[in-house]
Image: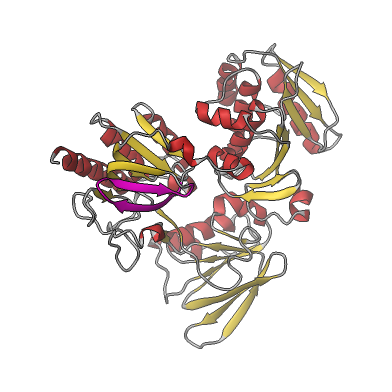
Amino acid sequence: MALDTEIKGQLGQYLELLESDVVFKASLGEDENSGKVSAFLQEIAGMSDKIAFENATLTRTPSFTITRPETESGITFAGLPLGHEFTSFILALLQVGGRAPKVDDSIIKRIKAIDKELHFETYVSLTCHNCPDVVQALNIMSVLNPKISHVMIEGGMFKDEIEAKKIMAVPTVFLNGEEFASGRMTIEQLIDKAAGPTSADAFSDKDIFDVLVVGGGPAGNSAAIYAARKGINTGMVVETYGGQVMDTVGIENMIGTPYTEGPKLMAQVEAHVNQYKVDIMKGQRAKSIRKNDLIEVELENGAVLKAKTAILTVGAHWRNVNVPGEEEFRTKGVTNCPHCDGPLFAGKDVAVIGGGNSGIEAAIDLAGLAKHVYVLEFLPELKADQVLQDRVHALKNVTVITNVATKAITGTDQVEAISYMDRTTNEEHTIALEGVFVQIGLVPNTAWLKDSGVVLNERGEVIVDNHGSTNLEGVFAAGDCTNSAYKQIIISMGAGATAALGAFDHLIRQ
C-alpha cells in the first residue's frame, strides 16, 4: 500500500528518532488482508536502515510483532494499525526502538514491580477515538516489563473473533483469555485493575495544598492553571484525565479553533498544565469531602488530602434510560458512543434513544453504517436543531418515532430487541435489533457529595454563586457538575478560571 505523501513525510521525521534497530516479525498468508499488512510494513521498513522485516509464525494472520533483534518486546498488532491507531503504531515503534515512554516515574516503578505474567488482547475499531488510549497504555506496560505482553486486534480484519466473543463495544480488553475491561481507561486505571490500587501510604507525604482541584476536565484544568499561575501550592485529584470531552469527536465551537477533537484538545490542555508546578494525582476517585480547620478530601483508597481551599470540577456522565436490560446488556449491544462502537453494528438494525442534538447526530452517523436506525424520543417532537432534523428526515434508513416511552431492552447473550409504549395510544411495540445507543443527556457526578454539607439542587448540581463559591466556606465548584445555565466546554473553562480566582481571593483574605 502507498502511504499518503504528507503522512510519509511526518513518518520519516519520527523514524529518525529511532535509537536502536527494530524488526517487524510478520505472520502473513496469501489473502488480501495479509497483502495489505505486508505492503504497509515493507514500505515503512524501506524508509529506515534501522528497520528489518522477517517472516514469522504468530497466533493470528495477518499480524506482526515489533521487537529488537536481541529481545522480544511483547507488542503485537493483528491487522492494520491505521486510522486512530496509526499513532499507537508509531509510539510502539519508537518505544521499542529505545525512546522512553512519556509517563511519570511513579508509573514506571509500578509497572516494573508487577511480578506476574499478564497477556493482554485489545479489540479495537479504527474509528474509535478511545481505543488508542488503552492500546498505548498496554503497549507501554509491555515495553517496560517483560512479563507483560499485548496484542491490538483490529476488528475489521478479525470479524470472526468479534462475533465468536460477542464483542459489541470497543475497546474491549481480555487478560489471559478472560474478559478484563471495556471502554476508555487510563494507564493508572489499567495498572490498578491488573495489579491493585495505589496504597494510601503513597499520599502520606503530601503537603497541605493551597488549592486542591477535584476533577480533570476542562473546568478542572482551567482552575489548576489559574491557581498555579498565582504561585500557590496546587494539586489535582483526577479519576479520568480529560473527563467527558474525551468522548467528543468533533468540536467546532472552541473560539479561535475552527475544528478540533476532544482527545486532541485535552492533550493540549494537559501539556499546558504541565508547564506549571501542579501535583496531578491521576487514577484517584474522591470518596468524601469535609470541612474542619482545613478542607479534607478522602480518596477511595483511604488517603486523606488536606487543603485550604478546594474546587470541585467532577463533571457529569451519560444519563441512563433506566429500563430492564440496560445494564445487563451494556457492552453487549447497549452503548453510548456511536463513533467508537458504530462500526461493530455495520449492516445491523439499531436504535438511538434520544431526540436532542446528540441523539440525532448519532442517528446520522450510524445511518452510514447500520442497515436501519430507529430514533425513539419521549416528547411529541424532536429537540435537536432544525438543521439536524432536516438531515435525519432525509435519510431513507432512519425511522423517527416520537412520543414514546422505552420499556425494556431484551435478548439472551446480547441485545435482540427493544420494546416501547406509544404514549398516545398506550400500545406497546417491539423492534428486533442488535444495538441500542443511549443519548439522553448527562447527570452530574455528585452522588458522593450528598452527605458532605455541600448544597445541591433538585437535579443534583452543586449550587454556586458568581465567584464559584458553594455554601461551604473555602469550597468552590465549576463546570458541568454545577448549576451553570449551559453545559459547554468553553463555559466550563471560564467557570474553572472564576473558581480559581475566587479561591485565591478567599486565601488572601484569611
Which of the pair 469/379 is nearer the observer? 469
Above or below — where is 194 with respect to 466?
above
- Magenta span has 292? yes
Which of the pair 380/176 is nearer the observer? 176
The image quadrant that residue 12 belongs to is: top right
Horizontally, is 362 left or right of 38 in the view?
Answer: left
Pick the quarter of the image with the N terminus: top right
Which of the pair 496/1 is nearer the observer? 496
Task: Residue 243 in the image: state x and y as whole percent.
Answer: 44, 47
In percent of the image, x 54 and y 39: which residue is there?
188
Task: Residue 207 in the image: state x and y as whole percent.
Answer: 34, 33
Horizontally, is 176 left or right of 13 in the view?
Answer: right
- Does the magenta stretch mainly form a helix, a strand or a loop? strand
The image quadrant that residue 124 belongs to is: top right
In percent of the image, x 23 and y 48: which residue is there?
474
Q: Say whether residue 254 is visible.
A: no
The number of numbered discs placed on residues in the rendered structure image is: 0
Horizontally, is 55 left or right of 411 in the view?
Answer: right
Pick the quarter of the image with the C terminus: top left
- Magenta span has 90? no
Going by the picture, which residue comes out furthest to the top?
49
Which of the pair 82/300 is nearer the observer? 300
The image quadrant that residue 157 belongs to is: top right
Q: Say whether residue 147 is visible.
A: yes
Task: Residue 129 in the image: state x and y as whole percent.
Answer: 55, 43
Q: Which residues are magenta?
A: 285-301
